[in-house]
């Protein structure tokens, strides 16, 4: 039977529960188990798709087009298992489902209540869509004690009874702060947090303790005693230089061993060779490459989580450290100054008008100075716009996202397109939530293109999240200016990839390759981009 591991967090937020859950999953996988990770988010938004990156960081997109919490990105990067809509749930989604059922009359006259209706809906989500997984690791967002997470905690408490305590394990991730004045690591906040959990009927089985410093034996013994957890199940999780070291460290500290013991599972030792090799390459790179990223959310790097990881992965593949230079696109005056010293330039996805001029400036700089350029989604659309304005001379050209009444709508809202056999339709003033072109779409590549060579194939599938598209009416003119459309949707109606001729590396993609890069299988476009940056350097250097 599938075993369930529920991961809660206490004391403070941002403890890295997602990374902890992912790392545990990676080690269990390395022991030969089949794992799947899930996230329960307590907020009322139906999904994070409508939230600002400043609120929530990156919106991660799955193959099936679910807009999800960025922790799902960690899940995929640590396990390689593709997440689906079944792996991401929010209070908003649960309530919408329950309310829709109520309107349909499904509750047959009952008073609809949090207990049992909301709880039952969460339960069915947690236990739904499971085949032969050995473990479901389910992370509960937020911190124990938050009003909003109560229904989720009640659900996992009830599941302990429903599924049997020998099939359910509770891990509580907490913080042990170091108080310099006392020269001590403090256990009291964790004790209180466990009390809070106990007050909703959950006795944690394992405490995973985040700490800046090694945890003395005495503190572990004390925590075990006060929190009713065996001392060997108080596991240290101290800060690491690279997140990819966590599977190795957790294993060394006994986390997966205790999980197996709890469930009375005989398991082989994990084979962690891949992780050892990844960490070795991160800690001992043979060189460095500097890549400028020009974006508007540079104050909150969580907005670029998958992008940053993809560049780290590409660094690993090229045996170099990727040194990322963040350039604020809203400082348009100084963008080209800030780009000095960069061996390559990347403009990532983005929305809205703020900072557009800085991005266009950076793209022009890359094009004219033959510096490797990678444009992702908005970064591809703006590269097209830059060529149309500055090479074709259509200075009034724009994206309708940035100016609805432009005489030259080079980028526009797609109101109709074919998705396989289905006609997709969108309205100008329609809902914002869940209405972008989302998830995996196939794309056909020109067989003579650079991208076909990089991918080593001519049909690819990549994840999308955008509302606007390059207007096909301009394709011929843009191609005449040297910017070739080398990737198109299978129906041939949607431009997907551009490549600039007579330039060492200038590629724009309408999709988000960063969602599919893994440390153990880096994305080919990022790997080649970093390689181009290095080649550039050796040529100049
Ligand atoms: N704002 C653009 C669009 O909606 C690009 C989106 C993105 O970069 N993800 O099409």
Image (tube, rainbow, N blue to C red):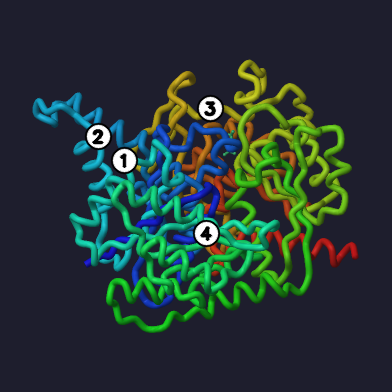
Secondary structure of residue under mark 1: helix
Task: Indicate which disc, 1 or 3, sits on the residue closer to the N terminus.
Answer: 1
Q: Residues within 10 Å of mark 4 (few under 14, many from 20)?
A: some
Residue at the spot of label 1: 151
In contact (CB < 8 Å): disc 1 and disc 3: no
Distance in Å between CA atoms under marks 1 and 3: 40 Å
Whether pointer 2 and pointer 1 mark residues with C-beta atoms closer than 8 Å, the reply is: yes
Q: Of callouts 4 and 3, which one flags the residue occurring earlier in the amino acid sequence? A: 4
Q: Position of residue 503 (x, y in %)?
A: 78, 52
Rendered view: 212 above or below 266: above
227 or 100, nearer to the observer: 227
- Of all residues, the one furthest to the bottom in this rendering is 268
Picture quadrant of residue 269: bottom left
Identify the element where label 4 is drawn.
Answer: loop
Disc 2 target residue:
114
Please give the name of the residue rendered at 54% of the width and 66% of the height, measured from the top-left corner. Answer: 237
């Amino acid at each position: 039977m599938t075993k369930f591991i529920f991961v809660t967090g206490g004391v403070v937020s941002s403890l890295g529960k997602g990374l902890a859950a992912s790392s545990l999953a990676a080690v269990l996988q390395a022991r030969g188990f089949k794992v799947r990770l899930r996230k329960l988010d307590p907020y009322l938004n139906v999904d994070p798709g409508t939230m600002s990156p400043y609120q929530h960081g990156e919106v991660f997109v799955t193959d099936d087009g679910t807009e999800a919490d960025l922790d799902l990105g960690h899940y995929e990067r640590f396990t390689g298992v593709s997440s689906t809509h079944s792996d991401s749930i929010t209070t908003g989604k649960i309530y919408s489902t329950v309310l829709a059922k109520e309107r349909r009359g499904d509750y047959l006259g009952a008073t609809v209540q949090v207990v049992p209706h909301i709880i039952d809906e969460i339960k069915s989500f947690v236990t739904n869509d499971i085949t032969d997984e050995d473990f479901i690791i389910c992370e509960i967002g937020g911190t124990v004690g938050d009003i909003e997470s109560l229904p989720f905690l009640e659900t996992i408490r009830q599941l302990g009874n429903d599924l049997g305590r020998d099939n359910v394990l509770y891990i509580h991730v907490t913080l042990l702060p170091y108080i310099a004045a006392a020269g001590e690591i403090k256990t009291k906040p964790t004790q209180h947090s466990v009390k809070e959990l106990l007050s909703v009927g959950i006795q944690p089985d394992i405490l995973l303790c985040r700490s800046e410093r090694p945890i003395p034996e005495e503190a572990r013994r004390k925590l075990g005693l006060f929190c009713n957890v065996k001392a060997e199940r108080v596991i240290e999780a101290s800060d690491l230089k690279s997140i990819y070291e966590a599977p190795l460290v957790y294993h060394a500290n006994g986390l997966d061993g205790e999980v197996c013991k709890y469930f009375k599972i005989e398991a082989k030792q994990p084979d962690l060779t891949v992780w050892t090799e990844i960490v070795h390459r991160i800690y001992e790179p043979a060189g460095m490459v500097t890549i400028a990223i020009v974006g508007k959310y540079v104050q909150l790097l969580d907005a670029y989580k998958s992008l940053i990881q993809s560049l780290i992965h590409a660094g690993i593949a090229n045996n170099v450290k990727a040194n990322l230079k963040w350039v604020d696109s809203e400082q348009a005056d100084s963008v080209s100054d800030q780009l000095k010293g960069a061996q390559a330039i990347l403009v990532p996805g983005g929305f809205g008008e703020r900072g557009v001029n800085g991005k266009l400036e950076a793209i022009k700089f890359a094009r004219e100075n033959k510096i490797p350029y990678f444009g992702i989604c908005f970064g591809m659309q703006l590269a097209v716009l830059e060529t149309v304005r500055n090479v074709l001379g259509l200075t009034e050209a724009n994206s309708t996202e940035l100016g609805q009444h432009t005489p030259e709508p080079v980028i526009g809202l797609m109101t109709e397109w074919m998705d396989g056999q289905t006609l997709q339709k969108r309205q100008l003033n329609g809902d914002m939530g869940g209405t972008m072109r989302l998830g995996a779409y196939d794309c056909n590549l020109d067989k003579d293109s650079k991208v076909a060579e990089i991918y080593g194939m001519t049909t690819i599938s990549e994840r999308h999240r955008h509302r606007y598209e390059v207007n096909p009416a301009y394709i011929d003119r843009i191609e005449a200016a040297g910017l070739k459309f080398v990737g198109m949707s299978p129906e041939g109606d949607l431009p997907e990839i551009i490549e600039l001729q007579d330039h060492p590396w200038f590629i724009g993609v309408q999709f988000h390759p960063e969602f599919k890069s893994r440390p153990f299988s880096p994305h080919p476009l990022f790997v080649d981009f970093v390689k181009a940056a290095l080649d550039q350097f050796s040529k100049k250097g």
